Image (spheres, rainbow, N blue to C red):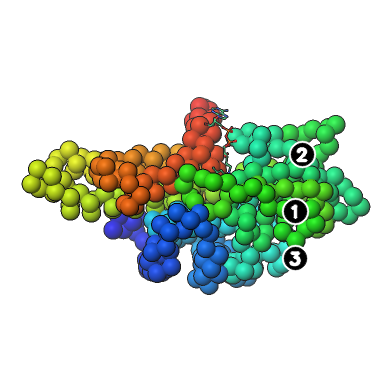
Amino acid sequence: MMTDLHHLTEEQRAIIATARAFADEHVRPYADQWDRAGHFEPSLVRRLGDLGFLGMLLPTEYDGLGLDARSYLLALEEIAAADASTAVMMSVHNSLPTQMLNAFGTPEQKRRFLAPMARGELLGAFALSEPDAGSDASAIRCQARRDGDDWIVEGTKAWVTSGTHAGVIIAMIRTDTPEARRRSKGISAFILTPDLPGFTVGKKEDKMGLRASPTVQLVFDGMRVPGDRMLGAEGQGFIYAMQSLEHGRLGISAQSIGIARAAFEAARAYAMERKQFGQPIAEFQGVQFKLADMATRLTAARALLHTVAAAKDRGVLVPGEVSMCKLFASEMAMWVTTQAIQVFGGYGYMKEYPVEKYFRDAKVTEIYEGTSEVQRIVIGRAVSKPQ
Ligand SMILES: Cc1cc2nc3c(=O)[nH]c(=O)nc-3n(C[C@H](O)[C@H](O)[C@H](O)COP(=O)(O)OP(=O)(O)OC[C@H]3O[C@@H](n4cnc5c(N)ncnc54)[C@H](O)[C@@H]3O)c2cc1C
């Protein structure tokens, strides 16, 4: 197994085995059917929670497993190899809302929200993007104004992963005033729950891929948010969100690697079985070269991810390296899934075979949690300074 390159501990091997057994029983057999129906399977949340997979990075004090980033990313790769939609639900939950609550929440907020999230009783979502604010996230317009101890919020959030089923949404909302805009410093983070008056789940998107992961608008129409739902300090929400996206981008890298691995394994198996010109196509050097390049890029992406994740665990991250992982792994996934279709020939284009789903699922990894262009901006800034 390629991950052996990374000197796994006994505990990490056990996590991989658990994740793989879970995926084989509860995810892989249904992934195709969920994809076709655009169905999100809510029982996965409780099941993943029972395994501890929704609190992998959280302290045991809040019912988390207290694991290192590498262990979490290994589990995520296994889930993504079975179904990218299930993986994004797990990745967003573990990387964004729970990380923000853990880092910036009060003890009371952590007891109330974080511990049930770790147990899988509450699913988490992250609401930063808006219809007119994507890559330029500091241009968000959702606006809060004070009303006594409460805040009244107006606006719309776009493309919130798991938004239909989330019990906790960490949302970035402006708390400056339209008269005195402070760009990123005028944004605060709030802990939202669907029971808040004025909160509604809006349009559900009909997507190319990740079809079993609901992506929705959230509409705030005079939504009343109690003052104690602010997360951390006023005006710091944008900074918190950018910090948590560091975890998120490692998660999306693991998701990309999982998707690409599934595509590679399917292509290899097919190449050994499919005969043309009287022999398995895997015996043609032209096909072997494709498999060789796929395996090489996959191994390189995994090696980069685990090197950077280990640096994160040791607290010695180098600026730009998380973006390098996300950029390299997502572009690798798009490339590998494209090659997988080529190895399958015409059958690769048919829904009867799995590789067209991998291809559709891979594309979004180059877009969300910062597009490839945004990752290049971050890396470019980091590497063009005097060292
Ligand atoms: C399936 C899915 C799930 C999502 N889930 C979430 C979620 O849970 N929470 C959330 O907050 N958001 C979520 N998003 C939103 C996602 O993060 C944004 O789509 C992404 O940040 C890009 O923003 P945009 O779509 O507005 O594209 P734009 O920012 O409009 O970009 C359009 C194009 O212009 C390029 N571009 C923009 N600025 C520059 C520049 N300065 N230099 C060079 N090129 C540039 C981009 O790279 C891109 O190619 C999700 C999106 C999708 C598709």
Q: Using the numbered discs, state the Cα–Cα distance from disc 1 to disc 3 in whole angstroms.
A: 23 Å
Quarter-of-image position of residue 169: bottom right
Which class describes the residues within 10 Å of circle 1: few (<14), some (14-19), or many (20+)?
many
- Please give the name of the residue rendered at 64% of the width and 59% of the height, measured from the top-left corner: 166
- Residue marked by disc 1: 199
Q: Residue furthest bottom?
A: 50
If you read the primary sequence from the N terminus, does the residue marked by circle 2 or circle 1 appear first?
2
If you read the primary sequence from the N terminus, does the residue marked by circle 1 or circle 3 appear first?
3
Indicate the secondary structure of the residue bearing disc 1: strand
Give the number of marks. Answer: 3
**Image location of residue 200, percent across then percent down:** 72, 53
Q: Quadrant where the N terminus lies? A: bottom left
**Image location of residue 307, percent across then percent down:** 41, 49
Q: Using the numbered discs, state the Cα–Cα distance from disc 2 to disc 1 in whole angstroms.
A: 22 Å
If you read the primary sequence from the N terminus, does the residue marked by circle 2 or circle 3 appear first?
3
Residue 232 visible here: no
- Please give the name of the residue rendered at 30% of the width and 49% of the height, measured from the top-left corner: 264
In front: 194, or 233? 194
Q: Do the numbered discs 2 and 3 sit on residues whose CB atoms are within 8 Å? A: no
- The label number, if any, that marks residue 186 in the structure image: 2
Vertical placement of residue 191 versus 114, above or below: above
Q: Amino acid at mark 2?
A: Gly
- Residue marked by disc 3: 108
Q: Do the numbered discs 1 and 3 sit on residues whose CB atoms are within 8 Å? A: no
Left or right: 37, with 116 as reference point: left
Which class describes the residues within 10 Å of circle 3: few (<14), some (14-19), or many (20+)?
few
